[in-house]
Image (spheres, rainbow, N blue to C red):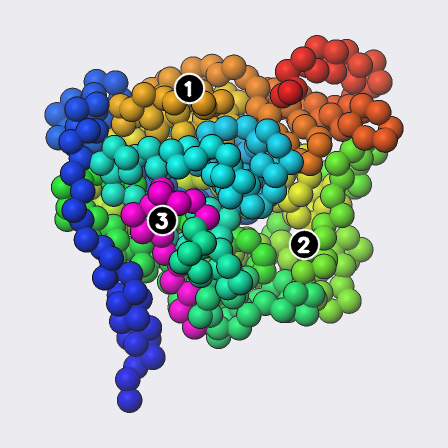
Amino acid sequence: MADPASELKELRHGLYYSTLIMKKQFLPLLILFSASASCIPAHAATPPNILLICVDDLRPELGCYGREHMHTPNIDELASQGRLFSQHYVQVPTCGASRACLLTGRYPRTKADRENRAMVSRYQKLGASLSFPALLKNNGYQTVSIGKVTHYPGGLMGKEWNNPAQEELPNAWDEHLMPSGEWKTPRRAMHGLAGGKERIRGKSPAIEIKKGGDDLYPDGLITETALEYIHSLSQQKNPWLLAVGLIKPHLPFTAPKKYWDLYKNQDLPVLGQPEKPKRRLTWAGSGEFFGGYNHGGKDPRKDAKYAALVRRHYYAAVSYSDAQVGKLLAALKKSGQADNTIVILWGDHGWNLGEKRIWGKHSLYEEALHAPLIIRLPNMKQVGVPCASITETIDIYPTLCELVGLKVPDSLDGVSLKPQLVNASAPTDGLARSFWGASQSIRTETQRLTRQIGKGGTQYNLFLFPEKSQPTEEEVKRVSEKLKGSFFK
Ligand SMILES: [Ca+2]
C-alpha cells in the first residue's frame, strides 16, 4: 500500500513543479540594478533575491523584542543578524487590508481598502502594476508566493479559495501556491485543525494541542514546499522573490505538542492594561474569538485560568511558526544564496491577548497595530542593533525598490527605510497612520491619537507612552489640536 505521506508529496510535486519552468530573462533589471545604491556588495553579479516571510497575527511578543518568556530562537537569531524595527505599525488591523498595504505601498483610502478583500478592490482600481511582486516580475525576477501572503492562502478566490479563474492579485506571481494536504482546499486549511479537520464556525475549539510533527498543521506543509523552492530557485540565474506566508499564530491557536511543552509550566508576565479602557473609542467586541469558536462556556475575560491557558496556546503557536522560520533560514544558508538575499520578516498586525479586555485584533489600540518587522541585508553593518524610529508597513515597498535599484513608483505613500538599515539611529518622519472603518489613528514616539467620526461628531482618544497615566482633558485637547492636521484625508 502506498504511503499516504509520500502520495501527498507526489501530489504537491505534480501540481506545483509542473509549472516551475524558468524561462525569463532579467536583462531589464541588470541594466537598472546599481549595487552602489544598496547595501549589497558592488561585486554582486545579479540583483539580490528577496525572501519575504509573512506571519499571521504575530504580536511583537518575541524574545528579540525583549519578552523573555517566549521561545523564539530563530526569529531572535534573524534579529541578531539584521535590523529589528521596534516601533513598526501596520495600516489596518486585519489580514487582507494590511497585506494589501504591504504589497501596494499605499494607505487605504476607501472603506473597501480597509477590508479583507482590499487586494481585489485595489487591483481593479489601480491595475496590474500596482504591487511590488508585479514590479519585480516585470523587471526579471521570478516571483513565487507560498501560503498566506495575500488574504487568501494561495492567492485564489472562489468557494474553496482554489478557483484558478479568480486570482486575488493577477500578474504578480509566476506561481502562487497553497499546499492544503489533508485539508484538501485552502479555505479548509486556513483554520484547519489536526487530522485534516475543518473549523466549524462557532463549534470548533479555539485551542488545540496534538502530538505530531510539524506537518500536523498546514504551516508544516507550507514550509516544506518553500524549502523545495528555495533549493530550486537557487539553481537558476534569475533573481527571485519568494514570499512565504505562515498561518500561525492566527486562530485557532494550534500547534504540535512539543511547542506547547515549552510553555505548559512557564510563568507568564502580568498582562498589561487588562481593564476595559475608559476611553473606549473603536473598542472591539472580539467577535472573531467569541463568535468563531466554541469555548465550552468559558470566557477569558472572567476566568483568569482560561485566559492564561489561551495565552499559552497562542505562545505555542508562535513557537511553531518560529520553528518554520528557522527551517527557511537554514535552507537559505544551505542554498548558498544567503549572501545575496534580503530577508524580511513581517507580522500583518498585532493582537490583543486580553489587554483592554479585548481578545482579537479589530481595533485601533496599540496592541492591534504594533507588529514585528525585521530586515536582514547581505553584508549589513550594525547587525543586531534595533531601530526605534517609528516605521509603518507601507515603507517596505519603497525600501525594496531602493535596495534592488528600481525607481520608486510615484504612487507610493511610504518612505524607504534604507537610512535606518544603514544606521539604526537614523530618524524617520516619526509618524505612523492606521485605519479602521471610518476611524484613524496616528502614532508618534510618545503618543497615539485616534479620531472617530460618528453620530456624536468628531471625537479624539489619546494614549501616552509608556502607558502609565491617562491624559487629562487638557492634554487631549492640546495634542489633538497639534496632530489633527496629520490625519489622512
Ligand atoms: Ca492577520
Q: From the viewer's perspective, is residue 276 above or below residue 290? A: above
Question: What is the number of the mark on residue 288?
Answer: 2
Check disc 2 and give the amino acid type: Glu
- Quadrant of the drawing holding the C terminus: top right
Q: Do callouts 2 and 1 mark residues in contact (Cβ within 8 Å)?
A: no
Question: What is the number of the mark on residue 145?
Answer: 3
Q: From the viewer's perspective, is residue 231 above or below residue 484? A: below
Query: Which residues fall within the magenta stretch?
Result: 168-182
Tell me which numbered mark, 2 or 3, is placed earlier along the sequence: 3
Q: Is residue 214 visible?
A: no
Q: Residue at x 25, y 38 (%)?
A: 141
- Quadrant of the drawing holding the N terminus: bottom left
Q: Residue 284: x and y, percent?
A: 74, 43
Q: From the viewer's perspective, is residue 467 above or below residue 286? A: above
Q: Residue at x 33, y 33 (%)?
A: 135
Q: Residue at x 38, y 33 (%)?
A: 129
The residue lying toward the viewer, choosing from 27 and 265, is 27
Tell me which numbered mark, 2 or 1, is placed earlier along the sequence: 2
Query: Is the residue indicated by label 1 positioned so its CB lies within 8 Å of ligand 1?
Result: no
Q: Do callouts 2 and 3 mark residues in contact (Cβ within 8 Å)?
A: no
Check disc 1 and give the amino acid type: Asp
The main secondary structure of the magenta stretch is loop
